[in-house]
């Protein structure tokens, strides 16, 4: 299963706590269907670069999980995002 976070709310002013972002787990075939539909979608591989270089989903970007918080500016805010 893969994790999806729609980041539309990230563009609004930050509340006192963590922002609420719609999230859910989806199956691989659902991600494939989203890719096949040509809808805007960002796929982020959160594994280490060595693992990413070895094999990754076509079109995925590598942002290791330990770097994600410091690289949030690279994550689109107006489209669904799949993390795996």
Image (spheres, rainbow, N blue to C red):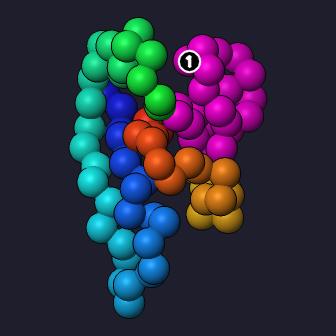
The kind of secondary structure element at disc 1 is: loop
The correct choice, above or below, for 32 with respect to 53 in the image is: above
Magenta includes 23? Answer: no
Closer to the camera, 35 or 60? 35
Residue at 26% from the left image edge and 38% from the top image edge: 25
Q: Which residues are magenta?
A: 42-64
Q: Position of residue 79 (x, y in %)?
A: 45, 42
Measuring from the top left, give residue 65's x and y in whole percent.
Answer: 58, 50
* Corner quadrant of residue 26: top left
Q: Can you tell which quarter of the image residue 35 is in?
A: top left
Left/right placement of residue 63 relative to residue 10 reads right
Residue 44 lies in magenta, yes or no? yes
Binning the other alpha carbons within 10 Å of mark 1 as few (below 14), some (14 to 19) or many (20 upward) gives few
Q: Is 49 left or right of 46, judged from the image as shown?
A: right
Residue shown at the point (47%, 31%) measured from the top left: 41
- The N terminus, quarter of image: top left
As drawn, which residue projects farthest toward the top?
36
Q: Position of residue 32 (x, y in %)?
A: 38, 13
Q: Residue at x 47, y 29 (%)?
A: 40
53 up-or-down from 64: above or below: above
Q: Is residue 22 visible?
A: yes
Q: Is residue 10 left or right of residue 64?
A: left
In this image, 27 relative to 35: left or right?
left
Q: Is residue 84 visible to us here?
A: no
Residue 72 occupies quadrant:
bottom right
As drawn, 25 above or below 11: above
Task: Identify the residue at horizontal 27%, vertical 54% (top origin).
Answer: 22
| Numbered disc total | 1
- Residue of label 1: 57
């Amino acid at each position: 299963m893969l994790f999806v976070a729609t980041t539309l709310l990230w563009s609004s002013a930050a509340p006192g706590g963590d922002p609420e972002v719609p999230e859910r787990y989806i199956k691989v075939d659902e991600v494939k269907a989203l890719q096949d539909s040509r809808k805007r979608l960002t796929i982020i591989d959160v594994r280490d670069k060595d693992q990413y270089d070895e094999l990754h989903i076509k079109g995925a970007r590598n942002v290791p999980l330990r770097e994600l918080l410091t690289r949030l500016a690279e994550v689109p805010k107006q489209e669904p995002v799949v993390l795996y």
